[in-house]
Amino acid sequence: MLRTSSYVIYVDLPNESDQMLLVHGYTGAYDQVSGRVANYVRSLESKKPPKPLYGDWSPEPFVDDAVLPSEQTINTLKKRGYLTELSVDAEQALFDKLTKVRHTAAGRYPGYVFMPTYDCNLRCSYCFQDHMRRDNACRTMLKTMSPATVDRIFAAMPKIEEYHQIPPTEKPHRSITFFGGEPLLARNRPIIEYIIAKAQETSTPSFGVVSNATELQEYRHLLGPELISFIQITLDGPPHEHNKRRIYADGSGSFEQIAQNISMALELKVRISVRLNIDRNNIHELPELAREIIKRGWHHYDNFHAYTAPINAANDRTDRKTTFSSWELDRAITELHKQDQDMFVIERPDMRLRSQAGQIFTSQSLPSLQPSFCGANTSMYVIDAFANLFACWERTGDERIRIGYITEESDLVIEDAMNKLWRSRNVTTNAICRQCRYAHYCGGGCAVLAENRHGELSANFCDGYAARFRAGVAESYQKHIASQQEAVKTESLCEEV
Ligand code: SF4
Ligand code: SF4
């Protein structure tokens, strides 16, 4: 019997009340249809969409009367996956199979994250590693990685690649990210240089860093497209606000030193991504920060971009009431963009989601569907100074949660239970995500945020995804149509000429 696929997403199109966009959750199809056709598709839904166990999905757009479309339209709807003759269970089985294939493909190449130390020179109140620097019992954790440990790690990398069934090659490509603590402390320079040299000797590497950039001037000789080509740096607002939050151990602020280092790295052609951690207390400072960016001329560089991210309540010094969800932040920043013209230098949130949505319309092949949320669920290896391996950089520093380690003899030991817990997490390992029509776009949400909020890594973390996706898709679709119209105009102008 013909019924509506359980994975059809209905997207309202602003200013086109009689039209709607259908997007298919696992085939990647999209089609603009009349409200009548959308109503017909909706009328064949065999059950109400499930409610998430945690959080809320925004209600699907309302549709009323249903009229039978032509046979040709029905056939097209079938071909595109919106209508199916599969039973609910058979379609679920197909969804599970597709998820497995896509999840395996996503985990093919390992990405390496080196944590040369857990130590840091700043004391940000919301830091998830805060306890390590405040609690004396954790002091031994703050040591710096030794050259011998680096040697062990590099000797074990081919074993990690073999574990991912990558055939050995003489110089494999390896993506290496430095993370901490603060990886680029001045005193870490010898070990960072050693890791870079070792990577160059054994592979064709690319290097990125997540850094507070307070001591970046010590790494000038390593910055540029051939070496450290990407740095993510955090600012928490204009100088006076940032200097209250991202402080040194003596309480002094870090803005000016970071700003000087951003200017230096931009000149050296390093891609700089400035992350602005935002909550309800500092959002109103963003226009002032935008003016600071303009004053320093960073926006003139193609290799600069600034984006916002919500602060999450990761320790008990952060009041959850002051935080935004991703959807709330998106709305608030979009509003600020309308009110203040200088805000153009700060990207709206969810641009990744919007560009992903844009791919639905522009790519010849399938858009990038992701049945798991991030590298922690596939092939990211976060390696600390003790050669412990972790899946996620926000869950480190405790051997009980490691997914493995590298022995003194450079053997790779995988801790099966923990490894499975992280690496198998995808949208079929959670009963709610498994039935969610957004699943192959969302991936189930961040495991860490899910655990912080609900106590389980396997819980879903929706973070307003349904509303964000529909808004992003509608916006991208309108842009796509506008650019097509523009192209047609240019073409006809050319013909006239
Ligand atoms: S699980 Fe969350 S915190 Fe960890 S790497 Fe993935 S997105 Fe980041
Ligand atoms: S796939 Fe995403 S939106 Fe859907 S239930 Fe899971 S976390 Fe929520």
Image (spheres, grey):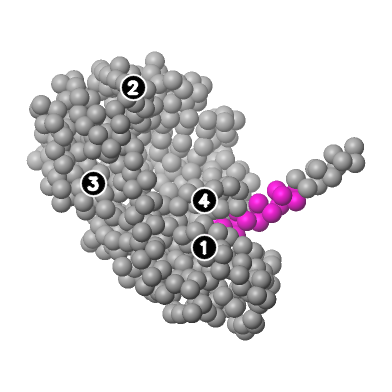
| Residue topped by disc 4 | 366
User: Where does the magenta region start and end?
Assistant: 469-486
Determine whether the beta carbon of the residue marked 3 sits less than 8 angstroms from the nearest atom of ligand 1: yes
Tell me the element at label 4: loop
User: Rounded to the nearest whole Å, what is the CA distance between mark 2 and mark 1?
Assistant: 40 Å
Q: Is residue 251 magenta?
A: no
Local crowd at mark 2 within 10 Å, few (<14), some, or many (≥20)? Answer: few
Judge by depth and name the residue closer to the eye, 359 or 125. 359
Q: First in sequence, mark 3 or 1: give its number.
A: 1
Q: First in sequence, mark 3 or 4: give its number.
A: 4
Q: Position of residue 227 (x, y in %)?
A: 40, 21
Q: Which mark is residue 171?
A: 2
* Kind of residue at badge 3: Arg
* Kind of residue at badge 4: Leu
Verify CB contact (< 8 Å) between mark 2 and mark 1: no
User: Rounded to the nearest whole Å, what is the CA distance between mark 4 and mark 2?
Assistant: 31 Å
Q: Position of residue 373 (x, y in %)?
A: 36, 52
Q: Report the side of 389 relative to 137 (left or right).
A: right
| Residue topped by disc 3 | 395
| Residue topped by disc 1 | 24
Q: First in sequence, mark 4 or 2: give its number.
A: 2
Tell me the element at label 3: loop
Local crowd at mark 3 within 10 Å, few (<14), some, or many (≥20)? Answer: some
* Kind of residue at badge 2: Lys
Q: Report the side of 427 relative to 75 (left or right).
A: left
Q: Nearer the viewer, mark 3 or mark 4?
A: 4
